[in-house]
């Protein structure tokens, strides 16, 4: 396999090439724009491209995981370039970067049995699953205005997004069904968890944020949107806050040309899955969460 080169993403053209691989591998998932990817840059985050004879055949991401104390790797190989050693070289480069960052455990996610088998060759084991829930958007009525609280957009009250982090995200992130607690910094909350303030909704009682829900818009496929983090403070649960927020976001979607929304929910999060079912979501793909110790074992060391 001559002419193989793995190099870091640097230019806007590199970022766009990275995006196109991800879109080819995960066509049903929203991909951040070049501007969003640049905004997400940190000293511990590495994006890679694999080129063979001048053609980009794979990309890679090595970063801090949202799960405490872990790294995260995502090698993505174009379908036509698989089973040719590209994924192994990319995974090795990403894992080396995670090891150099001081991580002793690394996570990954796969959505098909072939990728699962590939990960198992390097010592990855399954730790949980996420299920995709999908809902078509039609003529969506706006919910009746609540009386005990008010719903506003982050565009209307931008200062409240930081309040939502402190008063909603931090108390509710531990409720997520993950092997170790999810950690999100204030900076990550401000960049990765919102992309259009007009499509993000807050439930507020006075000036206190009690719930959050909304949409992450897709510049490549504007007719689709991903459901953003949805959470309600514990003392306000059971009062239809989450469903009112979600119905509001779906009515907004209908008015803005969106015809489908989707969300990923941990299999163990029965309350959110049931709420989505009640709101008309059906089930789509399944994502398998994997974990492996670092440094990664070679395939022959794990019996593959």
Image: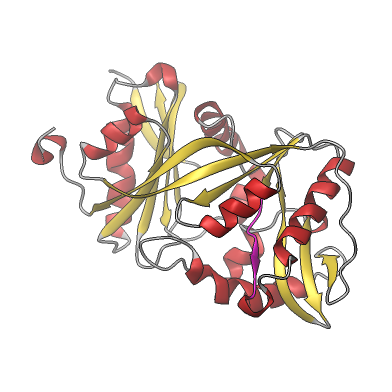
Q: From what the image shows, is residue 74 above or below residue 161? A: above
Left or right, 207 with reference to 264: right
Work out whether residue 53 can be spotted: no
Q: Position of residue 296 (x, y in %)?
A: 21, 47
Q: Nearer the viewer, residue 160 or 80?
A: 160
Residue 228 located within the stretch drawn in magenta: yes
Instruction: Name the quadrant of the C terminus.
Output: top left
Q: Position of residue 236 (x, y in %)?
A: 69, 76
Left or right, 303 with reference to 97: left
Which residue is rendered at x = 25% and y = 45% of the image?
Answer: 124
Q: From what the image shows, is residue 128 above or below residue 180? A: above
Image-quadrant location for residue 213 = bottom right
Residue 80 located within the stretch drawn in magenta: no
Which residue is rendered at x = 9% and y = 36% of the image?
Answer: 303
- Colouring method of the image: secondary structure
Which residue is rendered at x = 90% and y = 65% of the image?
Answer: 145
Query: Which segment is the magenta one?
Result: 227-233
Q: Position of residue 234 (x, y in %)?
A: 61, 76
Image-quadrant location for residue 75 = top left
Q: Position of residue 190 (x, y in %)?
A: 66, 65
Which residue is rendered at x = 90% and y = 60% of the image?
Answer: 144
How many tags in the picture?
0
Work out whether residue 264 can be spotted: yes
Instruction: Name the quadrant of the N terminus.
Output: top left
Q: Nearer the viewer, residue 41 or 141?
A: 141
Left or right, 16 with reference to 143: left
């Amino acid at each position: 396999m001559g002419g193989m080169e793995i190099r870091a993403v640097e230019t806007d053209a590199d970022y766009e090439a990275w995006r196109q691989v991800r879109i080819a591998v995960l066509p049903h998932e929203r991909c951040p724009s070049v501007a969003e990817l640049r905004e997400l840059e940190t000293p511990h985050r590495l994006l890679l491209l694999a080129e063979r004879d001048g053609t980009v055949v794979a990309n890679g991401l090595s970063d801090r995981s949202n799960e405490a104390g872990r790294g995260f790797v995502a090698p993505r190989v174009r379908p036509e370039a698989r089973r040719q050693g590209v994924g192994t070289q990319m995974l090795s480069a990403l894992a080396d970067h995670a090891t150099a960052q001081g991580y002793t455990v690394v996570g990954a996610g796969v959505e098909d049995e072939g990728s699962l088998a590939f990960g198992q060759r390097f010592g990855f084991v399954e730790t949980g699953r996420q299920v995709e829930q999908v809902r078509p958007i039609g003529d969506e009525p706006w919910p009746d205005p609540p009386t005990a609280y008010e719903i506003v957009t982050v565009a209307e009250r931008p200062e409240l997004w930081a309040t939502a982090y402190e008063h909603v995200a931090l108390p509710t992130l531990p409720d997520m069904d993950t092997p170790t607690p999810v950690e999100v910094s204030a900076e990550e909350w401000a960049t990765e968890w919102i992309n259009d303030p007009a499509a993000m909704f807050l439930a507020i009682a006075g000036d206190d944020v009690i719930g959050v829900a909304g949409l992450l818009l897709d510049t490549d496929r504007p007719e689709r949107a991903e459901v953003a983090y949805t959470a309600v403070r514990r003392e306000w649960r059971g009062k239809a806050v989450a469903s009112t927020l979600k119905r509001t976001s779906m009515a907004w979607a209908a008015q803005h040309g969106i015809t489908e929304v989707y969300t990923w929910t941990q299999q163990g999060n029965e309350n959110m899955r049931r709420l989505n079912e009640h709101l008309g979501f059906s089930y789509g793909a399944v994502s398998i969460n994997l974990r492996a110790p670092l440094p990664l074992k070679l395939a022959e060391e794990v019996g593959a």
